[in-house]
Image (cartoon, rainbow, N blue to C red):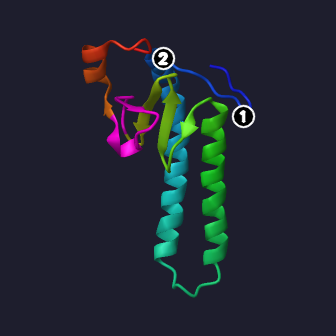
Amino acid sequence: MQIGSPADSKLYVLAEASELLPVVRKITENAYNRLSRLDERLELMLLCDPRRAAIAADYEKIVRKWIASITRLGAIPNGLWRVDFDTGEGYLCWRFPELKIGYFRDYDCEFDDRKSVKSLIEETAPFWA
């Protein structure tokens, strides 16, 4: 695995994206767990509690660090806990807590319009498979 600068982009085939997924998943799970703890603290506070601003700042730091980490790996954050891997034809898509990269979407499609990788491989045999 090569870690690049945040401006670097990479094209992936399914095997490469799948190989990188455990790292992406660990980074994401760590950030998710940290945010969950902040959410629990916020739920116990009154809306007027002045400590809420500090927690909101911590929340933003965690999200920004997650985005930077995913980007340095050559993947593309596409919403909170959602990651795209560019194939040159579209994106292999993953969303926490999915266990594998099981979806693909065209460049002009939304994340929620993603299609099953398995069915695409059977129907069209894309080069990235």
Residue 47: x and y, percent? Answer: 53, 84
Point out the image quarter for the C terminus: top left
Indicate whether 63 appears above or below 95. below
| Residue depicted at x 54% and y 30% | 23
For the residue pair 97 and 112, the one nearer the viewer reads as: 112
CA gap, disc 1 and disc 2: 20 Å
Which residue does the image show at 63% across and 36% down from the upper left?
71
The earlier-in-sequence mark between 1 and 2 is: 1
- The answer to if 109 sits in the magenta stretch is yes
User: Which region of the structure is painted magenta?
Assistant: 98-114
Does residue 29 appear to the left or right of 97 in the view shown?
right
Say the numbered circle drawn on residue 7.
1
Residue 51's disc number: none
- Residue 73 to residue 68: above or below: above
Q: Position of residue 97 (x, y in %)?
A: 39, 42
* Mark 1: amino acid: Ala
* Residue matched to label 2: 13
